[in-house]
Image: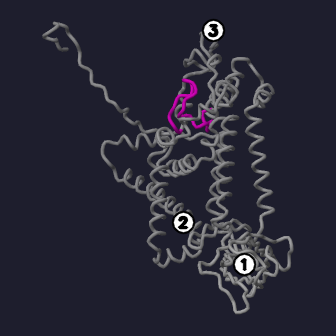
Amino acid sequence: MKIDPNKKVAYQEIEQSLFETQKKIYPRAISGYFANVRWLMVWFTQILFYGTAWLTWNDRQAVLFDLATRKFYIFGLVFWPQDFIYLAVVLIISALMLFLVTAVAGRVFCGYACPQSVYTEMFMWIERKIEGDRSARIKLDQLSCPSPRRIALKAAKHSAWIALALWTGFTFVGYFTPIRTLTFEVLDFSLGPWELFWILFYGLATYGNAGWMREQVCKYMCPYARFQSAMFDKDTLTVTYDSERGEKRGSRSKQADYKALGLGTCIDCHICVQVCPTGIDIRNGLQYECIGCALCIDACDQVMDKMEYPRGLIRYTTEHALSEKLDRHGIIQRMLRPRILVYTGILALIILVSILSLTLRSPLKFDVIRDRGLPRVTENGSIDNVYRLQIMNTEEQPHHYIIEISGIPGATIISDADFDMPAATTKVIPVRIRVPAGSARKGSNKIILVVRDRDNAAVSVAEKAAFLIPH
């Protein structure tokens, strides 16, 4: 307590930190329907990630993003830099699917399929297996001095984390460098500098995010948590605590009549908080930190079973369902609102157009580049122009192509216009075109070059070019 000498007024100084002290969260293990679904998604996503890199297709890696040759192989499809539009379409479809899922069921992607949640769950499983469940981990960390047992457990845990993180980084790089080649390079200690860098970088990111930062990534780094409210409405399914049924909270014996005691069905056991991977109390209402994993639902239902109370004190429901007492049928009806129908319609249309585009995509692409040299006049007065045709065979099978010309009467190709094209290659073909004297006006004349497949008339591409005749 201090006194201001000018005003003779007593005041008290209070120090307040601008930053909240970060408290370590010790999630408790829980079993139940949503926990099982979560682990099912962990298995599905990781088998997909770790396993796909080892699949083969046409004597090559099934999924390979070969940056050196600028070819992206995805099973039977080969994409080139010119196919960048398909990457844009994939990103648009992913964004629309995220908007649709969020509008319907909140942050279920975060809780079940987000890489941060998936790897955090894997790292926590390792932690539980080595250090024990919640209470054991708390006691271990509260030891005043490090014991040999604590050092051994911590060393074992971090060794397992680092091994998983490095395997993850290795697999990630295996989608850009053939993973079998990468394996031999690792075993021979002959990794290239960039391969080594990205394995260590991605491994360190996995180790840091899933092992150390965990919920802080979701709470402070992920932008999705900040703008999710813009996609929510009163008919969005979210993990919700039924305060009308649960309040007033309080402990009681199983045999006690909680209604006579003026209590709700919430016994204030805090198990819903203990299982939460982000450490929030769902009973305080919907919060941006909630990732929709629903582990609190499993925990609360188990407590309700023990107390012989009805399940559903914490459940997936909507704001309208709570206020209007809607049943499951009513919730589903309210879900089919214009917003959802618009998202679904746009998404279905884009997917349909994309599939048709991929199905009808021509395996032949080519560009025409006129040679910079001046037109050549032959002895009989004919005019020659030289062009370079950059031809691309996007399929994994060879083709035999023929070059044809139209646009100027009498124009002929005097170079080789019949050639073989190997599978998934690009070739530059020089083409010399000759026009008889007097067949076209002086200056620039439009011609059309056509490249077609000799064995399949449906594969044909035409490009315009300019034929110059000197004045």
Residue 377 in view here: yes
Q: Could you tell me how far apart the alpha carbons at marks 1 and 2 are, in whole angstroms?
A: 25 Å
Q: Quadrant of residue 411?
A: bottom right
Does the segment drawn in magenta span residue 21?
no
Predominant secondary structure, magenta span: loop
Q: Callout 2 environment at 10 Å: few (<14), some (14 to 19), or many (20+)? A: many
* Lateral position of residue 432 relative to residue 187, left or right: right
Between tags 3 and 2, which lies in front?
2
Q: What residue occupies the far front of the structure in this picture?
A: 471
| Element carrying mark 1 | loop
Q: Quadrant of residue 175?
A: bottom right
| Element carrying mark 2 | helix
Q: Are marks 1 and 3 in contact (CB under 8 Å)?
A: no
Q: Nearer the viewer, residue 346 or 218?
A: 346
Q: Horizontal and vertical percent for residue 144?
A: 31, 42
Q: Which residue is mark 1?
A: 423
Q: Along the polypeptide, which appears first: circle 1 or circle 2?
A: 2
Q: Could you tell me how far apart the alpha carbons at marks 3 and 2 are, in whole angstroms?
A: 64 Å
Q: Residue at x 57, y 69 (%)?
A: 67
Q: Are marks 3 and 2 in contact (CB under 8 Å)?
A: no
Is 118 drawn above or below residue 85 in the view shown? above
Between tags 1 and 2, which lies in front?
1
Q: Along the polypeptide, which appears first: circle 1 or circle 3?
A: 3
Between tags 1 and 3, which lies in front?
1
The type of residue carrying mark 3 is: Ala
The type of residue carrying mark 1 is: Ala
For the record, the magenta segment spans: 277-296
Q: Nearer the viewer, residue 416 or 456?
A: 416
Q: Quadrant of residue 86?
A: bottom right
Q: Horizontal and vertical percent for residue 142?
A: 37, 40
Q: Which residue is mark 2?
A: 173
Does the segment drawn in magenta span residue 281?
yes
